[in-house]
Image: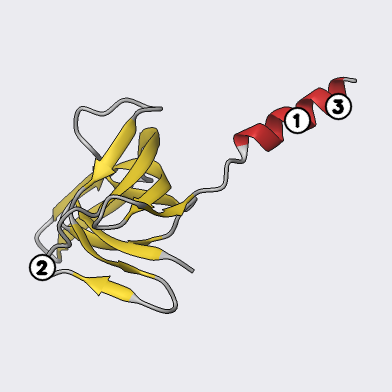
Amino acid sequence: MTYAVIQTGGKQYKVKASEILKIEKLENSKPESKIEFKEILAYGDDKKIEVGAPLVDGAKVEAKLIKNGKNRTVLIFKKRRRKNSRRKNGHRQQYSLIKINKIFSKDGGVFAEAKNTEKKEIKKQTKENK
């Protein structure tokens, strides 16, 4: 089980290859585009781990942006009793949905890669059409 710890949007995420993740919205990004995360705090597998101080130089994670969207509404209701004062607010946090494709080690080699499921889906569709 290979993984990497990345930092984006002020948060840290432990990611694996072919994992779908919801993160803070990435600015100036369009769906189906490739994204590279260069702030890698650590990566490794069951046998060895490489930890940065604070970052691992040369390591990166490549992902594909699936879509940008908004979460469900969070209601904020404030009331002061016996004062006839109340306030109701709502907030929808924006997010980006990404799929992790590859994890690169610090020497530039591919450490982990997502399995290609698109080819399997195309083969299934052609079999059904025959």
Helix, strand or loop at disc 3? helix
How many C-alpha atoms fall within 10 Å of the one at disc 3: few (<14), some, or many (≥20)? few
Which amino acid lies under the numbered mark 2 shown in the image of this protein? Pro
Q: Is 105 or 65 nearer to us in this picture?
A: 105
Helix, strand or loop at disc 1? helix
Q: In the rendered image, is residue 66 in sight? A: yes
Which residue is denoted by mark 2 in the rendering?
Answer: 54
Residue at 70 percent across and 37 percent down: it is: 120
Which amino acid lies under the numbered mark 1 shown in the image of this protein? Lys
Which amino acid lies under the numbered mark 3 shown in the image of this protein? Glu
How many C-alpha atoms fall within 10 Å of the one at disc 2: few (<14), some, or many (≥20)? few
Q: Between disc 3 and disc 1, whose residue precedes?
A: 1
The quarter holding residue 45 reads bottom left
Judged left or right of residue 41, residue 69 is right
Which residue is denoted by mark 3 in the rendering?
Answer: 128
Separation of residues labelled 2 and 3 (CA atoms): 51 Å
Which residue is denoted by mark 1 in the rendering?
Answer: 123
Q: Is 90 or 95 nearer to us in this picture?
A: 95
Judged left or right of residue 105, residue 82 is left
Q: Between disc 2 and disc 3, whose residue precedes?
A: 2
Q: Between disc 2 and disc 1, whose residue precedes?
A: 2
Residue at 36 percent across and 35 percent down: it is: 69
Residue 109 vertical placement versus 32 (above, below): below
Quarter of the C terminus within the rendering:
top right
Helix, strand or loop at disc 2? loop
Residue 130 vertical placement versus 71 (above, below): above
